[in-house]
Amino acid sequence: MCASVVIVPQEVIQEIVDEIKRQDAANLMPDWPARWQPKPETMQTAYPRMELSVIVSDEESQLATQMLSWGFEVTWSKQVVFNTRFDTATRPGGSLWSESLAQRRCIVPTWGFFEPHKSETFINPKSNKPNKQQYHFSSPGFPILFIAGVFQEGHFSLMTTEPNSAVAPIHHRMPVVLEPSELNTWLFGEYNLLADRSKVDLIATKV
């Protein structure tokens, strides 16, 4: 369950959208400007209910940015629903997510996401109690990590799937991390093909 990501500023996301419009995303990444690299002193973590800038397609099927709140409001819980299981959203007979998945897909650019280790803990010096050890996942090749999402009425949720070899030792689920060449597939193509993230290369760092 992904409940925190590192924020990419809106102005950087807009620059990325503009560059992707000008050239193929798969060929863009090696030449990304240095200003798009994360700076530790300015990095901020986002949590559910916060607003983030995400990439959507407009009415003319062009890429655009939009500010959305992380998490769907639901009547049956006081908490927002901030993750969407790929297998649940695509199951026969439909689900809470079916319409959004079919019509309102988005991409959430991040500088990485966090997951708690399923068993590893550390003693919190403030409370003197054990806390789950957090790990930060990032891409070894590109500064930006793209995560698939769905949205509706000003809110979005991150898609999750089975973990790959980088995530499985730490957590039982992972976000649907998109390769640069898969951005258009998620927004406009056969998105069902993207559930398998076994070949996505990620680096896990203890934090």
Image: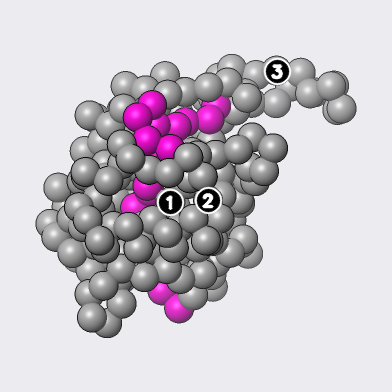
Based on the picture, tell me whether residue 150 belongs to the magenta stretch. yes
Camera-nearest label, 1 or 3: 1
Q: Earlier in the sequence, mark 3 or mark 2?
A: 2
Q: Earlier in the sequence, mark 2 or mark 1?
A: 2
Alpha carbon separation for disc pair 1 and 3 = 30 Å
Task: Using the image, tell me which numbered label, if any, was put on residue 109.
Answer: 1
Alpha carbon separation for disc pair 3 and 2 = 29 Å
What's the residue at 41%, 74% (across, down)? 152
The amino acid type found where label 1 is placed reads Pro
Give the labeled residue for mark 2.
8
Q: Are marks 2 and 1 in contact (CB under 8 Å)?
A: yes
Bounds of the magenta segment = 135-153
What's the residue at 76%, 18% (across, down)? 123
Give the percent coordinates (x, y) of residue 77. Answer: 57, 64
Give the percent coordinates (x, y) of residue 154. Answer: 49, 75
Give the labeled residue for mark 3.
122
**Which of these two is toward me, 20 or 207?**
20
**Which of these two is toward me, 25 or 99?**
25
Based on the picture, tell me whether residue 138 belongs to the magenta stretch. yes
The amino acid type found where label 2 is placed reads Val
